[in-house]
Amino acid sequence: MAKKRVAVLISGRGSNMVALIEAAKAPSYPAEIALVLSNRPEAAGLAHAQAMGIPTAVVDHRPHGEDRAAFESALQGVLDQYRTEVVCLGGFMRLFTPDFVLRWQGRMLNIHPSLLPAFPGLDPHGQALRAGVKISGATVHFVIPETDAGPIIAQAAVPVREDDDVDTLAARVLAAEHRLYPQALALVAAGRVTIVGARCLIEGGRQTPPEAPIVPET
Protein backbone atom coordinates (compact mmCIF):
# COMPACT_ATOMS: atom_id res chain seq x y z
CA MET A 1 0.00 0.00 0.00
CA ALA A 2 1.33 3.42 -0.97
CA LYS A 3 2.22 5.71 1.88
CA LYS A 4 -0.23 8.53 2.58
CA ARG A 5 1.11 11.98 1.76
CA VAL A 6 0.81 14.19 4.83
CA ALA A 7 1.11 17.95 5.28
CA VAL A 8 1.86 19.24 8.77
CA LEU A 9 0.56 22.75 9.46
CA ILE A 10 2.42 24.81 12.06
CA SER A 11 2.57 28.34 13.39
CA GLY A 12 5.52 28.08 15.77
CA ARG A 13 8.29 25.71 16.79
CA GLY A 14 6.54 22.56 15.62
CA SER A 15 7.63 20.06 18.25
CA ASN A 16 4.87 17.63 17.29
CA MET A 17 5.92 18.12 13.67
CA VAL A 18 9.40 16.89 14.56
CA ALA A 19 7.92 13.81 16.26
CA LEU A 20 5.89 13.03 13.14
CA ILE A 21 8.89 13.48 10.83
CA GLU A 22 11.03 11.21 13.01
CA ALA A 23 8.35 8.51 13.10
CA ALA A 24 7.84 8.67 9.34
CA LYS A 25 11.51 7.82 8.75
CA ALA A 26 10.73 4.19 9.58
CA PRO A 27 10.37 2.15 6.37
CA SER A 28 7.25 0.45 7.73
CA TYR A 29 5.49 3.70 8.67
CA PRO A 30 2.35 4.08 6.49
CA ALA A 31 2.68 7.84 5.91
CA GLU A 32 5.28 10.24 4.58
CA ILE A 33 5.60 13.88 5.59
CA ALA A 34 5.40 15.51 2.18
CA LEU A 35 5.17 19.12 3.35
CA VAL A 36 5.46 21.38 6.36
CA LEU A 37 3.40 24.52 5.87
CA SER A 38 3.17 27.59 8.09
CA ASN A 39 1.05 30.70 8.15
CA ARG A 40 4.03 32.55 9.67
CA PRO A 41 7.26 32.92 7.69
CA GLU A 42 9.15 33.38 10.97
CA ALA A 43 7.95 30.07 12.45
CA ALA A 44 10.93 28.27 13.96
CA GLY A 45 9.58 24.90 12.87
CA LEU A 46 10.24 25.72 9.20
CA ALA A 47 14.00 25.68 9.76
CA HIS A 48 13.71 22.41 11.71
CA ALA A 49 11.78 20.80 8.85
CA GLN A 50 14.26 22.03 6.25
CA ALA A 51 17.15 20.66 8.31
CA MET A 52 15.37 17.29 8.31
CA GLY A 53 15.00 17.36 4.52
CA ILE A 54 11.25 18.09 4.40
CA PRO A 55 9.80 20.52 1.81
CA THR A 56 8.34 23.67 3.39
CA ALA A 57 5.98 26.41 2.30
CA VAL A 58 4.48 29.57 3.76
CA VAL A 59 0.98 30.93 3.23
CA ASP A 60 0.98 34.12 5.26
CA HIS A 61 -2.50 34.89 6.58
CA ARG A 62 -1.81 38.58 7.15
CA PRO A 63 -2.18 39.84 3.56
CA HIS A 64 -5.67 38.34 3.52
CA GLY A 65 -6.83 40.35 6.52
CA GLU A 66 -10.15 39.06 7.79
CA ASP A 67 -10.91 37.17 4.58
CA ARG A 68 -10.48 33.62 5.86
CA ALA A 69 -11.89 32.10 2.69
CA ALA A 70 -9.19 33.79 0.59
CA PHE A 71 -6.48 32.55 2.95
CA GLU A 72 -7.89 29.05 2.83
CA SER A 73 -8.03 29.13 -0.96
CA ALA A 74 -4.32 29.95 -1.06
CA LEU A 75 -3.66 27.24 1.52
CA GLN A 76 -5.62 24.68 -0.48
CA GLY A 77 -3.64 25.55 -3.58
CA VAL A 78 -0.38 24.63 -1.87
CA LEU A 79 -1.85 21.45 -0.38
CA ASP A 80 -3.01 20.45 -3.87
CA GLN A 81 0.41 21.23 -5.31
CA TYR A 82 1.98 18.71 -2.91
CA ARG A 83 -0.78 16.13 -3.53
CA THR A 84 -1.73 16.15 0.14
CA GLU A 85 -3.95 13.33 1.35
CA VAL A 86 -3.93 13.95 5.11
CA VAL A 87 -3.44 17.16 7.10
CA CYS A 88 -2.00 17.17 10.62
CA LEU A 89 -2.36 20.36 12.65
CA GLY A 90 0.65 20.90 14.90
CA GLY A 91 0.10 24.15 16.75
CA PHE A 92 -1.53 25.87 13.77
CA MET A 93 -3.00 29.03 15.23
CA ARG A 94 -5.72 29.83 12.72
CA LEU A 95 -9.40 28.94 12.83
CA PHE A 96 -10.82 27.41 9.68
CA THR A 97 -14.20 28.08 8.09
CA PRO A 98 -16.71 25.21 8.18
CA ASP A 99 -16.40 24.87 4.39
CA PHE A 100 -12.66 24.21 4.60
CA VAL A 101 -13.04 21.78 7.50
CA LEU A 102 -15.75 19.82 5.70
CA ARG A 103 -13.57 19.64 2.60
CA TRP A 104 -11.02 17.74 4.71
CA GLN A 105 -13.54 15.80 6.77
CA GLY A 106 -12.00 12.54 7.97
CA ARG A 107 -8.58 13.61 6.65
CA MET A 108 -7.56 16.41 9.05
CA LEU A 109 -6.12 15.58 12.47
CA ASN A 110 -5.46 17.77 15.49
CA ILE A 111 -3.83 17.15 18.85
CA HIS A 112 -5.14 18.78 22.02
CA PRO A 113 -3.37 18.73 25.41
CA SER A 114 -6.18 17.28 27.52
CA LEU A 115 -8.31 14.17 27.69
CA LEU A 116 -11.19 15.46 25.60
CA PRO A 117 -14.04 16.11 26.05
CA ALA A 118 -12.57 17.51 29.27
CA PHE A 119 -10.92 20.93 29.10
CA PRO A 120 -11.35 21.99 25.46
CA GLY A 121 -10.25 25.36 24.17
CA LEU A 122 -7.67 27.64 25.73
CA ASP A 123 -5.57 26.98 28.84
CA PRO A 124 -6.32 23.26 29.17
CA HIS A 125 -3.58 22.75 31.75
CA GLY A 126 -4.86 25.58 33.91
CA GLN A 127 -8.36 24.17 33.58
CA ALA A 128 -7.12 20.75 34.69
CA LEU A 129 -5.25 22.12 37.70
CA ARG A 130 -8.19 24.26 38.80
CA ALA A 131 -10.50 21.24 38.53
CA GLY A 132 -8.18 19.18 40.72
CA VAL A 133 -8.10 16.19 38.37
CA LYS A 134 -5.57 13.46 39.09
CA ILE A 135 -5.07 12.46 35.43
CA SER A 136 -4.67 14.59 32.34
CA GLY A 137 -3.19 13.83 28.96
CA ALA A 138 -3.48 14.35 25.23
CA THR A 139 -6.05 13.58 22.54
CA VAL A 140 -5.72 13.20 18.78
CA HIS A 141 -9.03 13.76 17.01
CA PHE A 142 -10.46 14.48 13.61
CA VAL A 143 -11.22 18.15 13.02
CA ILE A 144 -14.85 19.22 12.69
CA PRO A 145 -16.30 22.76 12.58
CA GLU A 146 -16.79 22.75 16.38
CA THR A 147 -13.55 23.36 18.28
CA ASP A 148 -11.91 20.34 19.96
CA ALA A 149 -15.03 18.25 19.43
CA GLY A 150 -14.24 15.85 16.59
CA PRO A 151 -14.20 12.04 16.76
CA ILE A 152 -11.39 10.85 19.03
CA ILE A 153 -8.73 8.69 17.38
CA ALA A 154 -6.37 8.08 20.31
CA GLN A 155 -5.58 9.32 23.80
CA ALA A 156 -2.68 9.11 26.25
CA ALA A 157 -2.94 9.75 29.99
CA VAL A 158 -0.38 11.24 32.36
CA PRO A 159 -0.60 11.76 36.12
CA VAL A 160 -1.21 15.20 37.61
CA ARG A 161 1.08 15.65 40.60
CA GLU A 162 0.30 17.57 43.75
CA ASP A 163 3.11 20.06 43.12
CA ASP A 164 2.36 20.61 39.43
CA ASP A 165 1.98 24.04 37.92
CA VAL A 166 0.95 24.82 34.36
CA ASP A 167 4.51 24.52 33.07
CA THR A 168 5.37 21.18 34.66
CA LEU A 169 2.07 19.63 33.63
CA ALA A 170 2.43 21.00 30.11
CA ALA A 171 5.90 19.46 29.79
CA ARG A 172 4.64 16.04 30.89
CA VAL A 173 1.68 16.18 28.53
CA LEU A 174 3.89 17.35 25.64
CA ALA A 175 6.09 14.27 26.04
CA ALA A 176 2.93 12.16 25.75
CA GLU A 177 1.85 14.13 22.67
CA HIS A 178 5.11 13.30 20.94
CA ARG A 179 4.44 9.58 21.41
CA LEU A 180 0.72 9.72 20.67
CA TYR A 181 0.50 11.78 17.48
CA PRO A 182 2.67 9.48 15.34
CA GLN A 183 0.71 6.46 16.57
CA ALA A 184 -2.63 8.08 15.73
CA LEU A 185 -1.45 9.17 12.28
CA ALA A 186 -0.23 5.63 11.62
CA LEU A 187 -3.69 4.26 12.42
CA VAL A 188 -5.36 6.71 10.04
CA ALA A 189 -2.79 6.29 7.25
CA ALA A 190 -3.07 2.51 7.47
CA GLY A 191 -6.83 2.70 7.01
CA ARG A 192 -7.56 1.29 10.45
CA VAL A 193 -9.87 4.11 11.58
CA THR A 194 -13.56 4.25 10.68
CA ILE A 195 -15.79 7.14 11.74
CA VAL A 196 -19.21 5.96 12.90
CA GLY A 197 -21.34 8.87 14.03
CA ALA A 198 -19.28 10.79 16.58
CA ARG A 199 -16.95 7.88 17.32
CA CYS A 200 -13.84 6.37 15.80
CA LEU A 201 -13.71 2.60 15.57
CA ILE A 202 -10.21 1.12 15.40
CA GLU A 203 -9.73 -1.99 13.27
CA GLY A 204 -8.60 -4.80 15.51
CA GLY A 205 -9.83 -2.96 18.60
CA ARG A 206 -6.42 -1.57 19.48
CA GLN A 207 -5.78 2.13 19.91
CA THR A 208 -2.06 1.81 19.23
CA PRO A 209 0.14 -0.55 17.25
CA PRO A 210 1.31 -3.44 19.44
CA GLU A 211 4.92 -2.52 18.80
CA ALA A 212 4.43 1.01 20.15
CA PRO A 213 2.36 0.97 23.35
CA ILE A 214 1.67 4.17 25.23
CA VAL A 215 3.33 4.13 28.62
CA PRO A 216 2.10 6.95 30.87
CA GLU A 217 4.75 9.05 32.53
CA THR A 218 5.50 8.08 36.12
Image: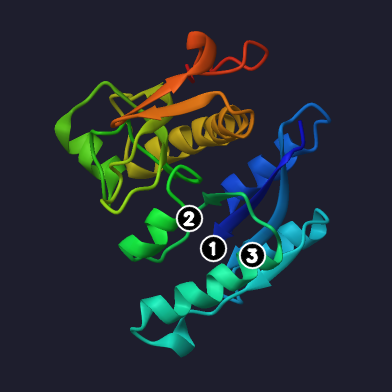
Q: Nearer the viewer, residue 195 or 187?
A: 195
198 sits left or right of 178 in the view:
left
Q: Earlier in the sequence, mark 1 or mark 3?
A: 1
Residue at position x 22%, y 25% from top? Answer: 133
Category of crowding for the residue at label 1, using alpha-carbon neighbours closer than 10 angstroms: few (below 14), some (14–19), many (at least 20): some
Residue at position x 61%, y 16% from top? Answer: 209
Label 1 amino acid?
Answer: Gly
Question: Residue under circle 1?
Answer: 12
Reply above or below: 11 against 176.
below
Q: Are marks 1 and 2 in contact (CB under 8 Å)?
A: yes
Category of crowding for the residue at label 3, using alpha-carbon neighbours closer than 10 angstroms: few (below 14), some (14–19), many (at least 20): few
Label 2 amino acid?
Answer: Gly
Q: CA distance from mark 1 to mark 2?
A: 7 Å
Q: CA distance from mark 3 to mark 2?
A: 21 Å
Give the numbered dot on residue 91: 2
119 sits left or right of 42 in the view:
left
204 sits left or right of 81 in the view:
left
Category of crowding for the residue at label 2, using alpha-carbon neighbours closer than 10 angstroms: few (below 14), some (14–19), many (at least 20): many
Label 3 amino acid?
Answer: Asp
Q: Residue 156, how many percent across, how many down?
A: 44, 24
Q: Secondary structure at mark 1?
A: loop
Residue farthest to the left?
131
Question: Residue under circle 3?
Answer: 80
Residue at position x 66%, y 59% from top? Answer: 36
